[in-house]
Image: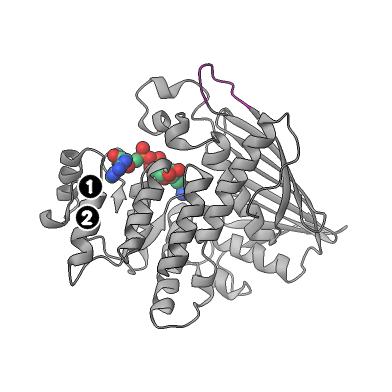
Amino acid sequence: MVGGGEGAYIGGIHRFAARLDNQYELVAGAFDINAARGHAFAAENFIAADRSYDDFTAMIAAESAREDGVDVIAICTPNFTHYPVARACLEAGIDVICEKPLTSTLEDAELLAEVVQRTGGFLGVTYTYAGYPLIAEARQRIAAGLIGQVRTLQVEYPLEWMATGVELKNNQQAAWRVDPKKNGRGGSVGDIGTHAYHLAGYVTGLKAESVMADLATFVEGRALDDNAHVLIRYEGGARGMLWSSQVAIGCSNSLRLRIFGETGSLMWAQEQPNELLFTPLEGNSQVIKRGRDDLAMLTRSRTRTPPGHPEGYIEAFSNLYSGFADALRARDVGQEPGQAGAAVPQIYDGLKGVAFVDAVVDSHEQGTVWMKPKYC
Ligand code: NAI
């Protein structure tokens, strides 16, 4: 693991997720930008002292020289570091699980895509919400025609935590997120809009054709947007609206997706992830519940507890981890991955996310005009 040390946010979730299905063992790390703090964290987490490294460069050099060196490195650091760390891993023959957004600039994302192609390495992207069982179910049912052709979708990802200038009050997570050099060009749209954009495309199978955005920065002195409204035109004529906000008071992690087709609709909300609402045209709504036997194979394989025993965030994250493991094992024996491995976000999904941010910010800067993302 790179990053994810003491006081960090997402690294701990990666560690929980990696353990859940016994597919990974955490054996080495450069856990912190501050080497001493990283070593202390490694010791507390029972990492052997000789596999706790000062920085990622030292780790990659030492691990790639070991017989029992690491197979895959999880990158849990701020956005601008993803590219150099991922590139160094792949060049050394080590596969990568990378946080979103893939990189802080489109140039870096394109370069990284070339490195993946050239080295034949694997790069999985942790778009967390793609790992939920009922998201797999929604995807499968839409592909099977349950709601007919999709006409319109609404996806929103509002949060409250940056409604005031928390970046000025020693908030580690906020500090780098408001710095364009470390975060990238999109504030809320890069941080959480990329999740929403990926989720909408993942579930519906729709490809964006163009986007038009109105960005706002409500907290004084902030250099990046903290609220984004984006219209999306999809190939084939479907329309989407995406809202990302870091200033939405009352919203903890209120990611919600609503999809309306010719013959029905599907709705899912991350804070009630064990239920999916299906409504047929002129019919009563039905709740599709996680854990039942009549769900799709991938949905069932992503479920660990019986119906009524809630699952959530860590299990969804773990489903991505297990999917990455499936994809890696299949690749290593020259086979196609199973459903789990085929369903995980990879390099091109990451590249599309960064291209979306670029198109959104360009659209806003040019007066809220339609822009075509470079990769869709
Ligand atoms: P954070 O600020 O809480 O943690 C960053 C960690 O990286 C710290 O331990 C820091 O010391 C370490 N670090 C920074 N530079 C380093 C370097 N060069 N070498 C080694 N360690 C280094 O950040 P947070 O919130 O955990 O975000 C990290 C990444 O995860 C970001 O890309 C963010 O967008 C993403 N993220 C993804 C989420 C998801 O749902 N998939 C949720 C939250 C964050």
Task: Residue 142: name its quadrant.
Answer: bottom right
Magenta region, mostly helix, strand or loop? Answer: loop
Task: Residue 116: name its quadrant.
Answer: bottom left
Q: On the picture, is 323 further left or further right than 61? A: right
Q: Is mark 1 within 8 Å of ligand 1?
A: yes
Whether residue 222 appears in magenta in the rendering, the answer is: yes
Q: Is mark 2 within 8 Å of ligand 1?
A: no
Residue placed under numbered mark 2 in the picture: 59
Q: Are marks 2 and 1 in contact (CB under 8 Å)?
A: yes
| The N terminus - image quarter | bottom left
Amino acid found under the numbered disc labelled 2 = Met
* Residue ID at (40%, 70%): 325
Whether residue 311 appears in magenta in the rendering, the answer is: no
Amino acid found under the numbered disc labelled 1 = Asp
Whole-percent x and y of residue 34?
22, 38
Task: Residue 181: name its quadrant.
Answer: top left
Inter-mark Cα distance, 2 to 1: 6 Å
Vertical order, 307 against 86 (above or below): below
* Residue ID at (66%, 30%): 365
Residue 103 visible at all: yes
* Residue ID at (11%, 54%): 49
Whole-percent x and y of residue 309?
49, 60
Whole-percent x and y of residue 336?
50, 80
Task: Give the extent of the magenta segment.
Answer: 216-223
Residue placed under numbered mark 1 in the picture: 55
Q: On the picture, is 315 further left or further right than 172? A: right
* Residue ID at (53%, 30%): 160
- Mark 2 secondary-structure assignment: helix
